[in-house]
Amino acid sequence: MANNEKQFVKEVADITADFPRWFTDVVLKTELVDYGPVKGTMVIRPYGYAIWENIQNELNRRFKKLGVKNAYFPMFIPESYLKREAEHVEGFAPEVAVVTHAGGAELSEKLVVRPTSETIICNMYAKWMQSYRDLPMLMNQWCNVVRWEKTTRPFLRTSEFLWQEGHTVHSNEEEARDFTMKMLAVYKEFAENALAIPVICGRKTDKEKFAGALETYGMEAMMLDGKSLQAGTSHYLGQNFAKSFDMKFLSKEGKLEYAYSSSWGVSTRLIGAIIMAHGDARGLVLPPVVSPTQIIIVPIAAHKPGVIEKAKEIEQILADMDIRVECDTRDMSPGWKFNEWEMKGVPVRIEIGPRDIENNQCVIVRRDNLEKQVVSLDDLASLKQLLATVQKDMLEKSRKNRDSRIKEGYSLEDIKNACDEGCFVKACWCGERECEDKVKEFAQATSRVMTEEECEGEVCAICGKPAKKKVYFARAY
Amino acid sequence: MANNEKQFVKEVADITADFPRWFTDVVLKTELVDYGPVKGTMVIRPYGYAIWENIQNELNRRFKKLGVKNAYFPMFIPESYLKREAEHVEGFAPEVAVVTHAGGAELSEKLVVRPTSETIICNMYAKWMQSYRDLPMLMNQWCNVVRWEKTTRPFLRTSEFLWQEGHTVHSNEEEARDFTMKMLAVYKEFAENALAIPVICGRKTDKEKFAGALETYGMEAMMLDGKSLQAGTSHYLGQNFAKSFDMKFLSKEGKLEYAYSSSWGVSTRLIGAIIMAHGDARGLVLPPVVSPTQIIIVPIAAHKPGVIEKAKEIEQILADMDIRVECDTRDMSPGWKFNEWEMKGVPVRIEIGPRDIENNQCVIVRRDNLEKQVVSLDDLASLKQLLATVQKDMLEKSRKNRDSRIKEGYSLEDIKNACDEGCFVKACWCGERECEDKVKEFAQATSRVMTEEECEGEVCAICGKPAKKKVYFARAY
């Protein structure tokens, strides 16, 4: 093992010794988030919200390419709507918030604060669709949703959170299935290229699927403690919601048919994923693509003539290159600033002092590996490339770590031991919910996604009966 | 009066004969919006939401220049918070929606769905501020708010709407007052340059001010029917919320002092303002800066060889110029498409057919005045300028119309008559609420903003007592 790898393993061990505490410390100290006054709610502070805005921009660009348009649907859903799809209400009723009074009077029908919007959107789609010519409809909304949770943690699980939820409706099954998978692929590409987080994608078991979906596909990201975080899902809903909400259209053949729908979403959880996939003992390590500030400039001996001016000059040059850059001219020592910006995870730091100016150079420090290099001031254009390199290296580092922590499991003990060691476990499975329940009980792990790998002739790691699927098990957030 | 002005006056008379109906027709037919299932709610459809996104981009850019950062605060406010500021609760309690149950149980404290967020944000600010060094704090959030209204209309007044609400806190009165006015100026510049809507800004009377503010400043826009629409407000809150939420900081002199705050907002109402300030008998007329599509290309005789290709080529050239352009290749007649895109208010239309291609030209039609011109295909770069010209001309046309419809009033009858004619009325006023109530009763009009104009020696148009202020009265949305 190379030295830097050993260092990495040691650091991971250090912070994951009490990972929940490290997480809470980091999110509060870096001012990403704070607790709201109502239990389980969070305030997303400017530094956290700026990450979210970058995520939004990245995803909007990708959605647009698929012809998806943003819209906004009401937050209040008549309680009766939620009840129309049997599985859906069973899944969500226990965690909804309910408005009973408004405008000083009791409401004749209670209103549910959306936990997700399939019901209200399908209701509108039904109204808007007449014939096959109106299809597909491809919409997305960025909004808040509420799910009343018992145990909460900032970004990971909060009563109210922000997300995007896309909803599409199609004239035939193939197209709807195709879109479901296409969005999963978009999410994967986004997670890897924008967040530098490698993900494992696949279909969820029936136990883990979305309430009301025929099939749920998820992407799972390994956090530094080896636990899995569900980072996004794409659901094929078949005609379930179409039948509950009378989403019918006149086909080419002139027949009235039920439409096929999909839905898919990612949330502010992704910020939690970024923190727990890349952080270290110094704090955050943010991937350049979504980092609010990509380069921080710290003047050295800022009182000396010309230093601030040169730092500002560099700032302008980088800003003109569309780099998100900031120059820290506060009246603090450089060391204090180094710590602060390392904690805040800014990908690249520039140090510039009188001697650097004399030599027409600056010192560059990468946050991801703390490597220092000297760059000529004539070569600032190379920093764009450096950011791309940091981004790529972060993904590769994560991937290497993740790949080294996937084990095969042939028994309940195997699964538990691997989870104890902070690994994902690939195991054959008979397809029965009972065996998933056993894994949960014995190893506190759940099935994350099913693989496409062959398991013919193999047996279920839990019950020994013939296997149907190879599945990833892991402890999860 | 020039011919085109006569035409304009006639068209305005036509559509304002039944303006509410025209409005409803237009917003539904152009698919800006639809009614949600819960009374008083609206669905903002992609065409409407795209306008909102452009408004967001325009404002975010302006906010950033003032150092304002976006954040997100929880939607649920403990009922007790609302009650802490006496005026605030009086103003908002009658129209809040209340969550009484969540997660399957009754809540120990009821939660109010934010009608505005002063209370929860001041509560957080209080936690974050220690010393004068932490000030000012300048934050904004884009979110949904709920105000239960009896009479609703899409965009203009809905139970749930989208807005931005900015909240700042400062160490001294002067700075807080200054920021309040600075934001009012930003709003004015934005309304005029982005929405092409001239606005009248000024302080609101006590009767019309925000519940909990010391002073409210508003901007008022004249709609085509002569009614006023409050398009944005900026509030100087003094130490009201600081005292209710214990927003104290250690001053330079080492004393614990209450901070001074401001808040300011604009909402999806602005979309209503755009519609009613610029529309005509054909439908919407959208200002280029916020129009989802700025230029629509309609191929003529699209089946002829080379036409679609040339249209697509033009689309690419314009897209490369950062123009929001679309090429309508649907299998419909050009005439049908002209109607459709005129109804949708796209600022500029390009018609390109075989003969145009032969002559290396295209036909350009402006939506705002329906003027046609022929432009060489070598001169497409001029379209950027054309969009700027349309934007400017729309503002000037609105301003001219507005200015021609402001009257002076010296009696209740004057005020009523002017309002009946679709005008704003400037009148001297004694400063008493009783007189405002009389105007409301007799002329169905309200004071919109106070002017800075001298009224010494003048008398109140309503009661005849010495005047204190010159005020704009108008009927309002």
Image: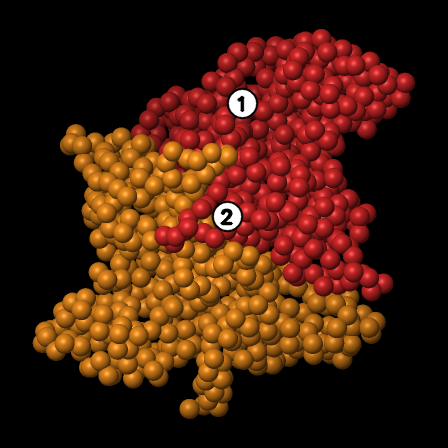
Chain colours: A red, B orange
Residue A381 occupies which quadrant of the picture? top right
Residue that numbered label 1 is attached to: A279
Which SS class for mark 1? loop
Q: Is residue A353 left or right of residue A346?
A: left
The residue type indicated by label 1 comes to Gly
Asked if residue B338 is positioned above or below residue A196 in the image, the reply reads below
Q: Position of residue B251 (x, y in %)?
A: 19, 34
How many labels, in total? 2
Seen at 61% across and 27% down, the residue is: A229
What amino acid is at disc 2? Leu
| Residue A124: image location, x then y, percent | 62, 57
Q: Quadrant of the N terminus of chain A?
A: top right
Mark 2 residue crowding within 10 angstroms, few (<14) / some (14–19) / many (20+):
many
Q: Badge 1: how crowded within 10 Å, few (<14), some, or many (20+)?
A: many
Examine the rendered structure and indicate whether residue A123 appears above or below residue B366.
above
Q: Position of residue A317 (x, y in %)?
A: 49, 42
Tag 1 subunit: A
Q: Chain of mark 2?
A: A
Numbered badge on residue A111 = 2
